[in-house]
Image (cartoon, grey):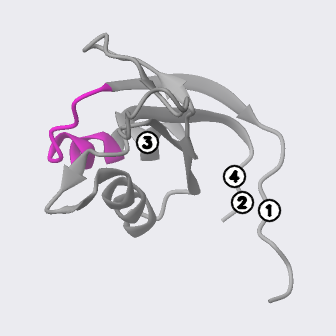
Amino acid sequence: MALSGRALRLTVFLGEDDLWHHKPLYHEIVRRAHQAGLAGATVLRGCEGYGASSMIHTTRLLSLSEDLPLVVIIVDAEERIREFLPRLDELAIEGLMTLDEVEVVRHAGRTGA
């Protein structure tokens, strides 16, 4: 189903060391989004950042921090995103989650293999 017009963007900020049952938490979030049939999800890895703990995580050579910031972005119709939120509550995510209204200009799958 193609998505167009008004939609909601769910952004989840977390660390790459965050786990769910000994697997990366971001993977579980994407898996659940896919299972819920949401339009799409993307995981972005940051090179530097800090959150509620105020501890800076960076890729700079002089720093040995490995728990780099990650962002999971999921976009779909507002009602579908809001229905999905309780599935994230089960994960007890430590971090920030935001919702933004967006306008989808184009949503098309790849053609071919």
Query: Which residue is under mark 4?
Result: 3
Query: Which is more foreground, mark 1 or mark 4?
Result: 1
Of the pair 6 and 73, the residue shown nearer to us: 73
Q: Is residue 101 above or below residue 67?
A: above
The Cα–Cα distance between marks 3 and 2, rounded to whole angstroms, is 15 Å
* Sequence-first disc among 1 and 4: 4
* Sequence-first disc among 3 and 1: 3
- As shown in the figure, which amino acid type bears the numbered disc 1? Ala
Rendered image quadrant of residue 45: top right
Which stretch did the figure color magenta?
Answer: 84-95
Q: Is residue 76 visible?
A: no
| Residues at marks 2 and 1 touching, judged by CB atoms closer than 8 Å | yes
Q: Element at badge 2?
A: loop
Across and down, in percent, residue 21 comes to 13, 62
**Which mark, by number, is residue 2?**
2
The answer to whether residue 86 is left or right of residue 51 is left
Local packing at callout 2 (Cα closer than 10 Å; few below 14, some 14-19, many 20+) is: few
The quarter of the rendered structure image containing the C terminus is bottom right
- Give me the residue at 34% from left, 47% from top: 84
* Sequence-first disc among 3 and 2: 2
| Residues at marks 2 and 4 touching, judged by CB atoms closer than 8 Å | yes
The Cα–Cα distance between marks 3 and 4, rounded to whole angstroms, is 13 Å
The answer to whether residue 81 is left or right of residue 85 is right
- As shown in the figure, which amino acid type bears the numbered disc 2? Ala
Query: Which residue is under mark 3?
Result: 81
Rendered image quadrant of residue 95: top left
Query: Which residue is under mark 1?
Result: 108
The Cα–Cα distance between marks 3 and 1, rounded to whole angstroms, is 19 Å
